[in-house]
Amino acid sequence: MAERHIIAGGELWGSPGALAFRHYLQTLTGERSPRICFLPTAAGDSDPYIAAFLSEMLDARCRPSVARLFDRGDRDLRGLLLHQDVIHVGGGNTANMLAVWRTHGVDDLLREAWESGVILTGMSAGANCWFEASVTDSFGPLSALRDGLGFLGGSYCPHYDSEEQRRPTFQRLVGEGFPAGYATDDAVALHFVGTELRGIMSAVADSFAYRLDRTADLVSEERIAPDLLLDETGRASAPTG
């Protein structure tokens, strides 16, 4: 079996640190011009969202493609997704995205791609999806979603530093029996090899990951400093201080 990578968190364009994450992915693929497929399902295959991705990836000398599901046509999704170096999942509505994926069989194709060595990545909904469960605003107010793809065990919560209700909601849910898991600030990504967390990276100083666990009636939250700080070339160094 090929080495399997999931990077949960970190945007490839339009956010602080995007260039750094993009270079990191390029280095991980070992390709000068990696093939990157965008899955914009969570945003309803938004044309402006797709245009922004294509513009940025072409400027970055990547070989971009898009897997549309709302206007699928006769495209061979399996051939498209398995012929990539990276599959990047965009943000939006996690619950709707998962439902559409399952209707089209994309859930099984993503597992096949992952097991064949295609790197899976994304932030927000694009990070939620890889776990068993997540904290989402798919239904309006923040709530629990328990039917993720389950490639990674436990739960995940994005936007920990940018949305003030994320932390209390995640803590409450774990206290009520929601699976233990991870949260990240917006500039932070979790790098899993197989199902093991191998690294935490950030493109912005003073951003963190968090581990939430429940013991008896207590919820513990451990703040974890990234072990890699990315610069704009994608080079990683240990944070100072």
Image (tube, rainbow, N blue to C red):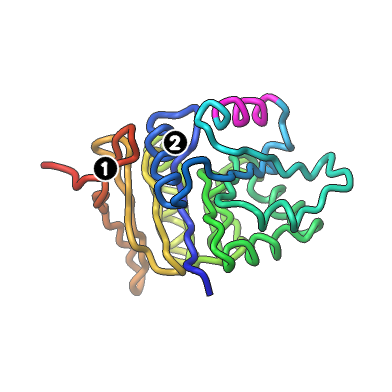
Percent across and percent down for residue 102 are 76, 59
Percent across and percent down for residue 143 are 57, 50
Q: The residue under label 2 is which amino acid type?
A: Glu
Percent across and percent down for residue 40 are 67, 40
Which circle's residue, 1 or 2, is located before the other in the chain? 2
- State whether residue 154 is above or below residue 157: below
Residue at 48% across, 47% down: 31
Residue at 49% across, 36% down: 12
Secondary structure mostly seen in magenta is helix
Q: Which residues are magenta?
A: 48-56
Question: Looking at the image, which residue sits at the far front?
Answer: 32
Q: Residues within 10 Å of mark 2 (few under 14, many from 20)?
A: few
Question: Looking at the image, which residue sits at the far left?
Answer: 241
Q: The residue under label 1 is which amino acid type?
A: Leu
- Left or right of 76 on screen, residue 196: left
Q: Is residue 54 magenta?
A: yes
Question: Looking at the image, which residue sits at the far right?
Answer: 74
Q: In the rendered image, which quarter is residue 66 located in?
A: top right
Position of the C terminus by quadrant = top left
Q: Is residue 204 visible?
A: yes
Q: Nearer the viewer, residue 2 or 131?
A: 2
The residue identified by callout 2 is 163
Secondary structure at badge 1 equals strand
Q: Which mark is residue 229?
A: 1
Q: Nearer the viewer, mark 1 or mark 2?
A: 1
Residue at 62% across, 62% down: 113
Percent across and percent down for residue 35 are 58, 45
Q: Which mark is residue 185?
A: none
